[in-house]
């Protein structure tokens, strides 16, 4: 995951924090310098203000409306696809987990709000097996689980100073999980 920002916060003796991170990933993203985005021209950084004719703005607005309607149809199609996932479509589960795919999926659990956080590590392993080691199918199954259970947001763990019996030390602190449920789901529950 070379496009993931990794951050470390170190507390100095004065009580301030030092941040170490690969923030150049954000800079490359903001200035459209990522290799995979070079052929896309949707986001471009430009200094100053350009004069744009009103006709161009109206055309762009019409295209955005069309894209919004298409996106709405895709969401409806995605919901149908989630409901249609059953045993016959999935086929037999794998007998062993593909370690390369498992490593990448389990690493994603560290990303705040990632869909892999909606299940435990064991459930994630079982889901990958159920998907026959096919990651896109695994993602669909996880989306179905997240739709049923709600999304989980696990903030990253960090070291927190503590004073115990006159001795100070750092202990890894894992903040509580934030659970977000769909409003429609809460209304029916």
Image: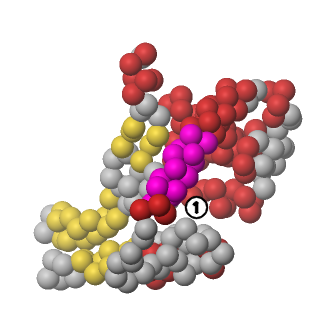
Residue drawn at x 28%, y 69% as measured from the top left: 170
Quadrant where the C terminus sits is top left
Residue at mark 1: 107
What's the coloring here?
Answer: secondary structure
Q: How many marks?
A: 1
Q: Describe residue 89's horizontal placement relative to residue 142 as left or right.
A: right
169 sits left or right of 100 in the view: left
Q: Is residue 111 part of the magenta span, yes or no?
A: no
Residue 7 appears at what percent x and percent y? 40, 73
Where in the figure is residue 43, as x and y percent of width and height?
A: 51, 70
Q: Quadrant of the N terminus?
A: bottom right
- Judge by depth and name the residue closer to the eye, 109 or 143: 143
* In the image, residue 61 above or below residue 159: above
- Kindly indicate the quadrant of the structure image that contains residue 138: top right
Q: Position of residue 174 (x, y in %)?
A: 36, 55
Q: Pinpoint residue 108: horizontal percent, then vertical percent.
A: 57, 58
SS at circle 1:
helix
Query: Can you say whether 148 is above or below 70 in the image?
Result: above
Residue 50, image quadrant: bottom left
Q: Residue at 42% across / 62% down in the picture?
A: 54
User: In the visual, does 7 lie left or right of 121?
Assistant: left
Give the magenta range: 57-70
Q: Give the residue at x 69% y 56%.
A: 102
Nearer to the camera, 112 or 64: 64
| Dot 1 crowding, Cα within 10 Å, few <14, some 14–19, many 20+ | few
């Amino acid at each position: 995951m070379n496009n993931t920002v990794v951050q470390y916060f170190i507390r100095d003796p004065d009580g301030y924090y030092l941040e170490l991170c690969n923030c150049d990933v954000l800079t490359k993203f903001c200035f459209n310098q990522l290799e995979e985005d070079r052929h896309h021209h949707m986001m471009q950084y430009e200094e100053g203000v350009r004069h744009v004719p009103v006709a161009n703005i109206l055309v762009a607005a019409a295209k955005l409306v069309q894209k919004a309607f298409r996106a709405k149809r895709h969401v409806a199609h995605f919901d149908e696809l989630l409901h249609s996932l059953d045993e016959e479509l999935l086929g037999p589960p794998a007998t062993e987990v593909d370690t390369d795919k498992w490593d990448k999926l389990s690493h994603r659990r560290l990303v705040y709000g990632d869909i892999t956080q909606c299940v435990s590590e064991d459930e994630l392993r079982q889901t990958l097996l159920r998907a026959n080691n096919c990651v896109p199918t695994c993602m669909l199954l996880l989306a179905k689980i997240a739709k049923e259970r709600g999304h989980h947001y696990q903030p990253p763990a960090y070291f927190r100073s503590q004073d115990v019996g006159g001795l100070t030390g750092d202990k890894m602190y894992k903040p509580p999980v934030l659970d977000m449920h769909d409003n429609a789901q809460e209304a029916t529950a």
